[in-house]
Amino acid sequence: MTHGDNTQSVDRIDGKYEVLSELARDGHMALYSVAVPGQPTPLRLCWFAVGSSAQRSSFHRYRSALKALAPAGLLDVVARPGAYYTVWQPLEGQPLGAFLALPVRGELEVQALRDLATGLSEQGFALSDAEVVFGEQGEPQLGYLAPAEHSPEEAGTLNAQILAPLKKGRLRRRRPVLSLWAVLPGLLFLGGAGYLGAKTTQIYLNPPVHEVGSVLGQPAEMGARTLAAAGFRVVYADGEGAGQAVGIVLSQDPPAGTSLPAGRQVTLTVNNPPPLTVPRLDDLSLDQVAVALAENRLTRGQVITVDGTFTNTPKGRVIAQLPAAGATAQRGDKVTLLISGGIGSKQTWLPPLTGLSFDDARDLVRRAGLVVNKITRQNSGARENTVLSQKPAPYAKVDVGSPVTLTIATTSFTGPSQSAGNLPLPPPVYVPPPVAPTPEVPVPTPDPTTPGTVTPNTATPDISAPNTAPPTGTTPPATDGTTVPGVAQSPSQNPSSGGQSGTTVQPDPVPATPPITPTVQTRTVRLDYAFPSNLPEGTVDIVVRDQDGERTVLSGTPSSAAAGATAQQDGVEVRGDAVFIVRVNGQEFTSFPAK
């Protein structure tokens, strides 16, 4: 697991510790079992994810406590930008719990344990935070100390509770053994201590003096190696430097050129600013991006222009960014931007529509994403409402939503070649008056038996037969001897005629009058309609209805786009009375006269 910038990946820490397993995790602290080449026994590594000044200060307090307590199990403490951890080795011995359970305990061991508990409480730690092991000589040792923050009073109270079992059981007092073997180790220790003390005193009083070299502007690790090679101890302190890379040495104390005895401490202030949060830049212009990045102490990186059609992003606006909004970055980091180059129009085309019915042609126009906004009618021998021509031409590429003009066939009408002139009026209808029956006077007839004798006719007249009236449609003759124009008279009705009586009068034939259809002229009207803002959800169509039927003026418009907008179109041709009809989802929404 490789660590860098307080993040973990793969299987190696700091390039030299191979992670075997994760033992525990608490907040920003993780405990791992690690292996080191040449070390047969696994070690424990406590890693601290330091991402804020508070976490950094907590680690330095922990390091100071370790320095004061000097745990026997502590192998290494590392504190540099991007790497904060401690390494522990396992210790052999009796655990603290087993020691407290013994019925008899050594006096020296108990006193050493109490002293260790006192030292821990002074540093803000309790025995519950430590791993205490009693070695072969019976002395308590710190095998591991977990980070904790207790007040000295709280730590003392916890330690008193843990050491309560010491009040029970017996103490085994040690008696000094006055033998050579008991004294000899002490004598040897004293002799060695005296020799080492003399040497130490000599070195301390007369240490070699070296000049502190300059490591400003170098990576912290490189500068530390340079100073350590000169015999100095190096510690780090965090700082912030504008325009400087993270991990660069900003200053050193004492400064370069100072003569300092070997073994003295040199403090390096390293550029390790707190992490920043990348702001959200979507839909901002470049000027707005510059202000947002400056406020967050970031810089603008590469700007890449891409097509904004699919994201519907206006030209010059940010489509995406890298790092993404909310990501963690350091001061001065660059942010790469994807900028819209504008919204390009989508294009489409129409197949040949000639010969199709108007409904089929309009359906194809809608499928192509276009709108039939003008219909021209032309007399033709083709079938009614058949498409004669189209504009734009077939297969011509046009923008989606462009208007389409269709020329539609209408049935031709041919009038009479010659004028019929003035037609004669039909004759009036004759209605005869009622006639009363006239009694017939008997006429004497000659008597065949007696010559010269007349016999009266006593036969009763037959008055049951109806009177004979002129047929309907005939005109009786005038009593003054004149004739009615256009009516043929019989000879008996015309005094000048020598014809016989009883001839029927026949009228002249009257020609039929053809119906006269008034001609309606084509006119143009203007569509001007403001859609209300509360249109129902669906698709909006506008049609015009006149003497020739219905035609679509606007079709296939979503109600969300039409709400609150105004539909305007000039040159809509109509014949006779016309009305515009607004339909939503095929249902009539409103209508208004076409003017």
Image (tube, rainbow, N blue to C red):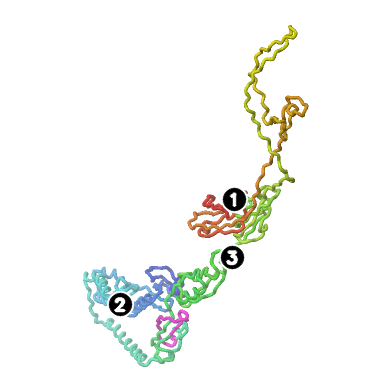
The answer to if 501 sits in the magenta stretch is no
Q: Nearer the viewer, mark 1 or mark 3?
A: 1
Question: From mark 2 to mark 1, how far is it between C-alphas?
Answer: 101 Å
Residue receiving disc 2: 123
Residue receiving disc 3: 344
- The residue at 47%/70% (across/down) is 280
The numbered mark, 2 or 1, whose residue comes first in the sequence reads 2
Q: Nearer the viewer, residue 510 or 593?
A: 510
Q: Quadrant of residue 79?
A: bottom left
* Percent position of residue 412, x then y: 69, 48
View extreme (right): residue: 498
Residue receiving disc 1: 577
Question: From mark 1 to mark 3, how far is it between C-alphas?
Answer: 42 Å
* Percent position of residue 245, x then y: 47, 80
Q: Which residues are magenta?
A: 227-250
- The residue at 74%/7% (across/down) is 450
* Position of residue 396 in the picture relative to residue 103 (left or right): right
Using the image, determine if residue 115 lies above or below residue 499: below
View extreme (top): residue: 449
